[in-house]
Image (cartoon, rainbow, N blue to C red):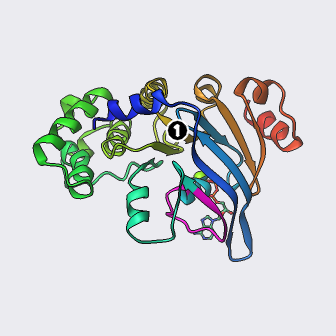
Amino acid sequence: MTAEATAAETAARPGEPLVVLDHVDKHFGSLHVLQDIELTVNRGEVVVVIGPSGSGKSTLCRTINRLETIDDGSITLDGEPLPAEGKALARLRAEVGMVFQSFNLFAHKTILENVTLGPTKVRGMKKAEADKLAKELLDRVGVGHQADKYPAQLSGGQQQRVAIARALAMQPKVMLFDEPTSALDPEMIKEVLDVMVDLAKQGMTMVVVTHEMGFARTAADRVVFMADGAIVEENTPEEFFTNPQSARAQDFLGKIL
Ligand code: ADP
Ligand code: MG
């Protein structure tokens, strides 16, 4: 199945719960980093997570594909509980695409190889098929002409778009973005956000941690505001930005807007 087909399938069944966090708790030693998190991300939905530094946004993202374990509660992906380990975990993890602040491309592999590695090694896709898929995806994020170069030859914005293509190549059901533009020079932020907006329009289910309030306003179906490890407020972007309910959110918005 191509990435387009996955998006089309997703778009065809919008609204069903795809990622469900139920009473999720996590501690780092004495720090209660995730406190009774209840969050449902529906198919085709774009959820933007915002909040002060240290509030647990990255940890939340990382629990969704079990880069972090949880102490209590459960996480369900497309109806299947995320197990602690084993083959089922590997299979479910492959359905969650992740894009980090640091692009983490393999420096000694070409752009094309960076994108084909997952499909060939994890999905067992034939090289020719993986090459074709990778080229389609690289074209889609606007770096198709860079396929034979190495990461260091690309700008930060281009590298981040490759990282998005690499995640999409695994044909994920949901894409997680953790501050994908925070490490970029200002002039490169838009080219990455534009790719994310396109992805959202094509029906991809997305969880996006970002400080880009313009993106949150225009692309989010829902804004989740976190503070001190808890979801303090959850609303449409219109409501959240014009009429924040909690003192924490009002204070946060007062500082950044
Ligand atoms: P955010 O992404 O909102 O800035 P994080 O999820 O990165 O927040 O971190 C939340 C809190 O958990 C912070 O206080 C951070 O220092 C702490 N933290 C994050 N990762 C670890 C870890 N591996 N071990 C101990 N504390 C951690
Ligand atoms: Mg973070």
Q: Position of residue 75 (x, y in %)?
A: 59, 58
Decide if residue 193 is in sight here. no
Q: Position of residue 187 (x, y in %)?
A: 45, 27
Say which quarter of the image contains residue 26.
bottom right
Quadrant location, the C terminus = top right
Is label 1 in a helix, a strand or a loop?
strand
Q: Is residue 114 depicted above or below 70 in this figure?
A: above
Q: Position of residue 43 (x, y in %)?
A: 54, 36
Q: Position of residue 15 (x, y in %)?
A: 59, 32
Question: Could you say which is closer to the camera, residue 151 or residue 235?
Answer: 235
Residue under numbered circle 1: 206
Q: Is residue 77 magenta?
A: no
Mark 1: C-beta under 8 Å from nearest atom of ligand 2: no
Say which quarter of the image contains residue 242.
top right
Q: Residues within 10 Å of mark 1 (few under 14, many from 20)?
A: many
Q: Is residue 67 magenta?
A: yes
Question: Could you say which is closer to the camera, residue 252 or residue 113?
Answer: 113
Residue at 46% across / 35% down in the picture? 185
Q: Residue furthest bottom?
A: 29
Decide if residue 30 is in sight here. yes
Say which quarter of the image contains residue 115.
top left
Q: Is residue 219 left or right of residue 11?
A: right
Quadrant location, the N terminus = top left
Residue at 72% across / 28% down in the picture? 236
Instruction: Give the magenta range.
Output: 64-75
Q: Is residue 75 left or right of residue 13?
A: right
